[in-house]
């Protein structure tokens, strides 16, 4: 089973940008559909973005569409989430997830490997 480690979170001002990374080990990443989820205090974990095994297909939550871009580099066994025009509603712990689904699924139970999360805080 693949192990995932997120990095790149931090404190950013309203309107700023951040790039999150998720490094995988223990298995070949190109056999997994990858996704980012986030969870704010007191809220359920929500889907942010997903990318196909080859990187040719992506899917985004409506709340981040046009602002966030997910990509992957299978040679480096790493996926990325580039976040722009950040606002306080984006404040959350961001999790990287890996799954075997053939399609760009958005439900947490469709992913069986998770990272520990990285905190993103956007100040007003």
Image: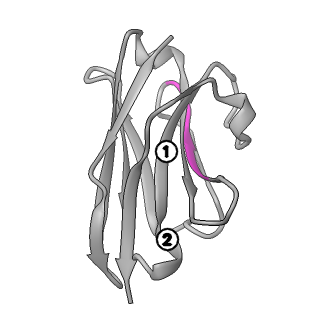
Indicate left or right for 108 with 124 as reference: right
- Rendered location of residue 120, percent (x, y): 38, 63
The magenta stretch spans which residues? 47-53
Question: What is the total number of numbered labels drawn onto the structure image?
Answer: 2
Near-viewer residue (110 or 60): 110
- Rendered location of residue 102, percent (x, y): 69, 22
Tell me what residue is drawn at x 35 percent, y 85 percent.
Answer: 14
The residue that label 1 is drawn on is 95
Do labels 1 and 2 touch, CB within 8 Å?
Answer: no
Q: Which secondary structure dominates the residues rendered in magenta?
A: strand
The residue that label 2 is drawn on is 90
In terms of secondary structure, where does tag 2 sit? helix
Q: Is residue 26 magenta?
A: no
In terms of secondary structure, where does tag 1 sit? strand
Tell me what residue is drawn at x 46 percent, y 16 percent.
Answer: 2
Q: Earlier in the sequence, mark 1 or mark 2?
A: 2
Examine the rendered structure and indicate whether residue 105 appears above or below residue 24.
below
């Amino acid at each position: 089973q693949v192990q995932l480690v997120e990095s790149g979170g931090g404190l950013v001002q309203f309107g700023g940008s951040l790039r999150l990374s998720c490094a995988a080990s223990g298995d070949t990443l190109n056999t997994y559909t990858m996704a980012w989820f986030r969870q704010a205090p007191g809220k359920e974990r929500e889907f942010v973005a997903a990318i196909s095994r080859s990187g040719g297909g992506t899917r985004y939550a409506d709340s981040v569409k046009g602002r966030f871009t997910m990509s992957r580099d299978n040679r480096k066994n790493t996926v990325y989430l580039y976040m722009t025009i950040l606002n306080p509603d984006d404040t959350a712990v961001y999790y990287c997830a890996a799954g075997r689904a053939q399609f760009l699924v958005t439900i947490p139970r469709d992913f069986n490997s998770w990272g520990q999360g990285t905190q993103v805080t956007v100040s007003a």
